[in-house]
Every structure is written in C-alpha cells, then in structure tokens.
Image (tube, rainbow, N blue to C red):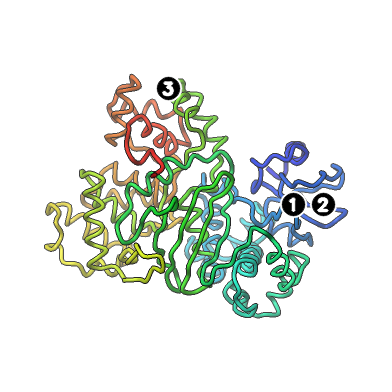
Amino acid sequence: MHTDTERCVRAVQSKDARFDGWFFTAVLTTRIYCRPSCPVVPPKTRNMTFYPSAAACQQAGFRACKRCRPDTSPGSPEWNARADAVARAMRLIQDGVVDREGVPGLAARLGYSARQIERQLLAELGAGPLALARAQRAQTARLLIETTELPMAQVAFAAGFSSIRTFNETVREVFALAPGDLRTRAARSPRTTAVPGVIALRLPYRAPLNPSNLFGHLAATAVPGVEEWRDGAYRRTLTLPYGHGVVALTPKPDHIACRLSLTDPRDLTRAISRCRWLLDLDADPVAVDAQLRTDPLLAPLVDAGPGRRVPRTVDGAEFAVRAVLGQQVSTAAARTHAARLVTAHGVPVDDPEGGLTHLFPTPQALAELDPEALALPRTRRTTLTTLVAALAEDRLRLDTDTDWERARAELAALPGFGPWTVESIAMRSLGDPDAFLPTDLGIRRAAERLGLRATPAALTARAADWRPWRAYAVQYLWTVDDHPINHLPA
C-alpha cells in the first residue's frame, strides 16, 4: 500500500487508525516517522514519504514519534492472509527466530538460501531480516524498560542485543532518548503500575473487535490446569524457548490488557507474538466483514456482532493433539481427555495466583505414553499416537510458518484424519483465514436454520463467495447456535 501515495495521504490527513501497521509515514523535515493515526497536525504532503515497515523507516534514518509510538502499531494483516515466503518469514521474525537462530536459521526453516530471503524481504518491506529483527528488538527493549525494574544490562540481553553498547545506540537512534530517559518518562505516566515479576502491556488491534466468540471459545474449551477464566481474564501457561510463562489476557474497549510472568525475560518477544497470534489481533476486520456482508444470509450475522476473530492457539502441536481428542465427542469430554494427559505427562509449574498447575505436554513427552492407558476407542488411540510420533520426530510441523497446503496433505495422510480435523488444525494452528468446516455439526445446524442445504458439497459451493475469509464465516455461522463458545463468560 505504501506505493499508493494518494491513498496514504488521505489516510494520514483523516487520521484513519484502520491503516496503522499497513504503512508508516516519514516526515522529511523532522526526520520522524509516525503511524497514520498520529494525533499531531499532519505534515504538508510534499514533506511526507511512506514506508512499508518501521524497520525501513529506521534504516532510512528516521526516528519513532514520541506521541503516536508507531513501534506499537498492530502488525500488518498481510502476514495473516498469506502463506508465501515473505509472509512466513515475517511470522518467524515476529517469533524471534532471527535472534535465536540467526538469518541462516530463518532461511533453513523456509527452505531458501539466506540471500534469497534477504532479496525478497528487501523488495517488499524495504528492509532485510536483520533490520526487521533489530526493529523488533528495539520495541522489546522499550517494553522491558518501561514495564519492569530490570537493570539495563539485563534488558539489553533479554531483548536480544549482543552487547550493551549496541543496545544503547539502537535505543537512542530509534527513540531519540537514552534507555534511562525512557524509564523516567514511563515512571511519570499515570498508566504505568509496576508489579514485581509481572510485565504489563497493551496489545493493540484494529477495531472493531468482538470479544464474545474469541474469549468465549477459549474459556469454554479451556483445559483444566493449563487454562482458566478468572476475574474477566483468560489465563494460561506458555511453553517458551528459554523457560515457561503465565499470561493473563483481558479484553478492553481499545486494546487487550496483557500481564506476563516469565521465568526468563528473553522469552518476551516470543510470548507477545504467541498471544497476538492466539487472539488474531493483526486481522483487518473491516475488510473481512465487508466481504462477508455481500452474502445476504451472512450480512445480518455480521451486523449483529462485527469484528469477530478466529480463536487460534499458542502452540500448533498442542491444538492438533486436542483436535484428535475432540473427534466425535462433546466439548466437556474433550476437556476431560486433555486434562488427563496434562496431569500424567505435563510439566508442573507454580502459579502465584493459583489455578494453573501444568504446561501442556510436548509431543516428545506424549511419545512415551502407553496407548492402553488412554480412555479412547482403539482407532482414536492409533490416530493420536501416530500424530504424536510424527510431531516428536519432526516429520510433521504445525508452526506459524508452515506451508498450509503441504501441512494439509501430510495430515490427511495420517490414519483417522478426516476433513473436519484437518481443517480445524489449518484454521487454528496454521492460521489459514480460508479454512472451512463444511462437515462441522454446528455449521450444518446453522445452514439448516438459515435455509441452506446442509450437505458438505452444497455448503462448500455456497462458501465460494466468502473466500478468502471462510474461517471468519465459520465464526459467524457458529453464532446461530446458542453455545457457550459464543458468549463472554460472566
């Protein structure tokens, strides 16, 4: 979008928050870059230039605006709706892969050479993987500076910087303030309340956001010991590269309040990325709802509660295991089966607030389970153990960077994996916005109530007009049934 100057200028002059994250405005006279909705008086058109990423702005010598804080914009919805190499690379960079594995590790995961990845990112985003990772490190550093009392040396290494000198130089260059000045400014802010051991931050999103199905689904399907709904917040444990964590996510009118307790602050980038992915916060609900409203049957459902997101997962392998446990049983039965696995094979953790007791078991831990101990039909046991073996041996990957169609083919080749299970995993683990569940009981009931033919073939044909947003159409169709997943818990 950044190449359409006229459209960008209109967005900046109208302070349209819908375009935050789509592009960034750099002001030639002040050498500052802003988000489109920056509250200051818009600069003259001749003084504006536009970039596709914050990293590209920084690389061109611009500093982040202190008013609108463009580094905290929602991510571009482009990476939600695409599965090409650039989109997959961006999802991995947001997960902190470059900091942990370097550019060679990023390229190896994508199946390209480092040079090819560099060239593709430069062409589309105006910055290579190192510059993009550097921009993210700066944002992580700012969060740690403003929300914790960690010494600056610990902040530097937790944010992914290789040296304190590089940390200091980057923070000064990006924010035009020294790290100590950033902390001083944050201490004067009435919104800042430091709690020892807890990192509190805001997760931005594009309005509207309907929390009912999002948090209702997560609460209704919560696995005891791993997840819970408490005091208006969804809480769960997180398995992270350097340790584990506990997160509490609370829906607010203009953001999601996030409270993180981490055993190692180096996991902050990954934890934030997982939480944003879980809640589908980088979606563009205006574009999605506009497409779905073109169908006269869906339009009333969209108008009744616009801004529905797709509830995803913090771990693709975890959801795949839970999807198998949920085959042909009720939500309550699926939770019971999952809770037994957690108790038997999950790693115990301490939760200062109580209620959460374990991490969900990894595929490697589940590979050691005794199939005879599972209270499941024999065919379901075979399905589960085959899946777990494929995940544990890395023959099957269900990460945010996984190619959607290849993963579908690999899942379908496993015993006991029908269309419902494959598409559920594609929708919630892989994040495919066009995943569709024509065999789902709730979808078929909704179709019958709306006067549609409820056969899978007929539903698939009707859903052609909803592409590429069929996963969001599923969320609206589920609202036809009065099910707990559609309601924000009391």
What residue appears at the point 38 percent right and 53 percent down from the top-left corner?
A: 229
Residue labelled with disc 2: 27
Residue 184 vs 280, above or below: the answer is: below
Residue labelled with disc 3: 297
From the viewer's perspective, is 335 left or right of 75? left
Q: Are marks 1 and 2 in contact (CB under 8 Å)?
A: yes
Residue labelled with disc 1: 34
Q: Circle 2: is it few (<14), some (14-19), or many (20+) Cα within 10 Å?
A: many
Q: In the image, what residue type sits under mark 2? A: Val
Q: Circle 3: is it few (<14), some (14-19), or many (20+) Cα within 10 Å?
A: some
Residue 452 vs 222, above or below: the answer is: above
- Image position, residue 17 (x, y; %): 67, 42
Q: In the image, what residue type sits under mark 3? A: Leu
Q: Nearer the viewer, residue 441 or 352?
A: 352
SS label for mark 2: strand
Q: Circle 1: is it few (<14), some (14-19), or many (20+) Cα within 10 Å?
A: many
What residue appears at the point 22 percent right and 44 percent down from the top-left corner?
A: 330
Visible in this render: residue 134? no
Q: CA distance from mark 1 to mark 3?
A: 40 Å
What residue appears at the point 51 percent right and 55 percent down from the top-left corner?
A: 88
Q: Quadrant of residue 56?
A: bottom right
SS label for mark 3: loop
SS label for mark 1: strand
